[in-house]
Amino acid sequence: MRLWSLHPRYLDRAGLVALWREALLAQAVLRGGTRGYRFHPQLVRFRNQPDPEAAIAAYLEAVCREAAGRGYRFAAIKIGRRRSKRPIPVTRGQLRYERTHLLKKLLVRDPLACKTLTAVGEPEPHPLFTIVEGGVERWEQIPENRNGKVL
């Protein structure tokens, strides 16, 4: 599960569709409707909100808006009714980490989107998030290579 902190505009078609599905899964988890993924680290920042379901609904709403702007028809009816207006902090280091992570994916599957994101100096966060100073978030699971160095 990857719930991007980056603005959905940076995602290619495959990434946007995957984000929609994964965020809907996150919504089901936060509602208590699944057995799996209950302890997934990507859900920490939503669980830490006063109303986790309203926070994920606001997240999904922005993804749905981005999709609509591209001519896709995501089923907005699947989004919970309550929407949080409370911004969630995300560290600048997390955004940089995710940018690098997404660039690696785009290099393989959508070179044009990769080129566009490469040209962006400081990526914007998802509309639900507000940038704060700091490194990569504690909940992020960073893969390590065999020498123990971060990839």
Image (cartoon, helix red, strand yellow):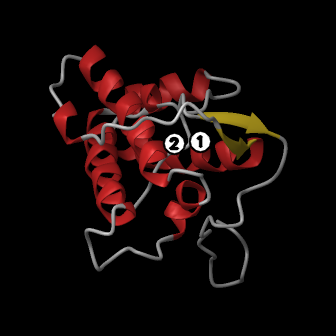
Residue in view at x 54 percent, y 61 percent: 47
Q: Residues within 10 Å of mark 2 (few under 14, many from 20)?
A: many
Q: Is residue 71 above or below residue 105?
A: above
Left of 95 or right of it: where is 25? Answer: left
Label 2 or label 1, whichever lies nearer to me, is 1
Secondary element at tag 1: helix
Residue 86, position in %: x, y? 61, 35
Query: The residue under label 1 is which amino acid type?
Result: Arg
Residue 67, position in %: x, y? 28, 25
Residue in view at x 17 percent, y 35 percent: 77
Quadrant location of the C terminus in the rendered image: bottom right
Residue 16, position in %: x, y? 32, 37
Q: Which residue is mark 1?
A: 99
Query: The residue under label 2 is which amino acid type?
Result: Leu
Where is residue 92, by image quadrant? top right
Where is residue 118, by image quadrant? top right
**Which one is nearer the viewer's eye here, 116 or 22?**
22
Q: Is residue 26 above or below residue 122?
A: below
Left of 106 or right of it: where is 137? Answer: right
Secondary element at tag 2: helix
Q: Residues within 10 Å of mark 1 (few under 14, many from 20)?
A: many
- Tell me the distance, in whole angstroms, between the alpha carbons under discs 2 and 1: 6 Å
Left of 1 or right of it: where is 90? Answer: right
Q: Badges 2 and 1: C-beta atoms under 8 Å apart?
A: yes
Q: Which residue is mark 2?
A: 103
Residue 63, position in %: x, y? 36, 32
**Which one is nearer the viewer's eye here, 96 or 59?**
59
**Which one is nearer the viewer's eye here, 139 or 16?**
139
